[in-house]
């Protein structure tokens, strides 16, 4: 798994601003200085993450993985068409949806889920748990999106991170001029609903559509190289505690394809979105039953309004009641 060259160039920018510190980091992780001379380098993710782990001590900043986008002076055009689409989108809501669709081209192995409340919006970043130091990766993605938001002069209400600071669970100020809550259960950015929907005076729908058509080629190539069902399941895992919100429109948006295209691609693999979702939930249900969780807890975690609905669904999938399955599948 690699990071795209556009992301790697942000480290080159960091070197231009802090050459001695970046060289010290490279020495610390055994990264050749000559690698920094290659602007088109595609960097393995473990080296990318180790860079920021080492940077914590060199910069003497426990939150360097959050602050790095501002330190490297990343601007929305850092990722070519992606940033421009964000700048010229109609509002933050459209901008977030665009980035949600395309960000895994630049940062493979990570995605984010948008949760709208009555007065605020939370963007939750979730890295593939198979990635070592996944929480650092989530912080890096958060940092990029936070830089995008601030570039449009919108305030961020707060940032939540899983990072364990030396000072304990305290509120600190980040370079994004907002409180940062460490040791949180999630990595997220919180903004007001008002700013989320505020009309952008620079919006240009035709330009955004044109840029989307350019990026779509990259998406098509990427989707064709992956196991579609596995990729969908990775995205579904992002909805832990929100499984009832899973729907084909959101998943297709994150994959960068239309719902029609997604249905067609799944049909070529002899399956449907409903089957993929049912199989995904069934695996989750069986796993939770084997761990000893109650039917009531499982039903609510999977998004069912009451246990009886879950029991009927489970019987329809397995011809067994959850209790019978649990009894016959003890370790």
Image (spheres, rainbow, N blue to C red):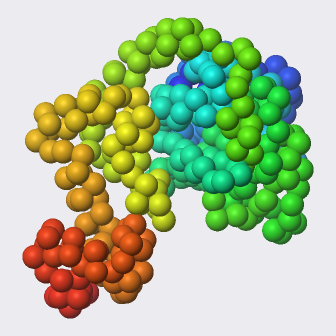
Q: Work out whether residue 122 can be spotted.
A: no
Q: Residue at the location (26% across, 30% down)?
A: 260
Q: Is residue 108 above or below residue 214?
A: below
Q: Is residue 244 above or below residue 150?
A: below
Left or right of residue 247, residue 134 in this image? right
Query: In which quadrant will I find the C terminus?
Result: bottom left
Q: Quadrant of residue 69?
A: top right
Left or right of residue 133, residue 324 in this image? left
Give the x, y percent position of residue 280: 28, 59
Q: Quadrant of residue 294?
A: bottom left
Q: Work out whether residue 271 can be spotted.
A: yes
Give the x, y percent position of residue 21: 84, 33
Q: Nearer the viewer, residue 200 or 67?
A: 200
Q: Residue at the location (33% across, 80% down)?
A: 307
Q: Is residue 75 above or below residue 189?
A: above
Give the x, y percent position of residue 186: 63, 59
Q: Nearer the viewer, residue 62 or 179?
A: 179
Q: Residue at the location (63% across, 54% down)?
A: 117
Q: Residue lying farthest bottom?
A: 327
Give the x, y percent position of residue 54: 74, 45
Q: Is residue 53 above or below residue 27?
A: below
Left or right of residue 242, residue 179 in this image? right
Q: Residue at the location (71% across, 52% down)?
A: 119
Query: In which quadrant will I find the N terminus?
Result: top left
Count of numbered labels shown in the rendering: 0
Q: Nearer the viewer, residue 153 or 145?
A: 153
Left or right of residue 66, residue 134 in this image? left
């Amino acid at each position: 798994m690699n990071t795209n060259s556009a992301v790697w160039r942000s480290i080159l920018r960091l070197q231009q601003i802090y050459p001695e510190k970046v060289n010290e980091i490279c020495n610390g992780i055994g990264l050749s200085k000559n690698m920094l001379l290659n602007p088109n380098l595609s960097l393995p993710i473990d080296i990318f993450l180790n860079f920021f782990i080492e940077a914590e001590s060199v910069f003497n900043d426990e939150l360097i993985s959050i602050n790095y986008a501002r330190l490297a002076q990343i601007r929305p055009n850092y990722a070519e068409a992606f940033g421009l689409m964000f700048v010229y989108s109609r509002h933050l809501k459209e901008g977030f949806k665009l980035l949600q669709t395309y960000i895994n081209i630049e940062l493979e192995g990570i995605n984010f889920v948008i949760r709208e409340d009555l007065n605020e919006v939370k963007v939750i970043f979730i890295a593939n748990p198979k990635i070592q130091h996944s929480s650092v990766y989530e912080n890096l993605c958060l940092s990029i999106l936070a830089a995008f938001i601030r570039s449009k002069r919108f305030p961020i209400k707060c940032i939540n991170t899983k990072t364990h600071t030396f000072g304990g669970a305290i509120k600190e100020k980040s370079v994004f001029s907002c409180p940062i809550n460490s040791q949180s259960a999630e990595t997220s950015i919180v903004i007001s609903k008002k700013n989320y929907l505020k009309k952008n005076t620079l919006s240009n729908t035709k330009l955004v559509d044109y840029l989307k058509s350019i990026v779509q080629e990259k998406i098509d190539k990427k989707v064709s190289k992956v196991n579609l069902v596995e990729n969908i399941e990775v995205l579904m895992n992002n909805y832990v505690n929100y499984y009832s919100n899973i729907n084909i429109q959101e998943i297709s948006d994150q994959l960068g394809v239309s719902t029609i295209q997604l249905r067609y691609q799944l049909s070529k693999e002899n399956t449907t979105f409903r089957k993929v979702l049912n199989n995904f939930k069934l695996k989750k249900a069986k796993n939770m039953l084997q761990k000893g969780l109650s039917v009531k807890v499982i039903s609510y975690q999977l998004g069912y309004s009451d246990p009886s609905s879950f029991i009927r669904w489970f019987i329809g999938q397995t011809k067994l009641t959850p209790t019978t399955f649990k009894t016959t599948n003890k370790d």
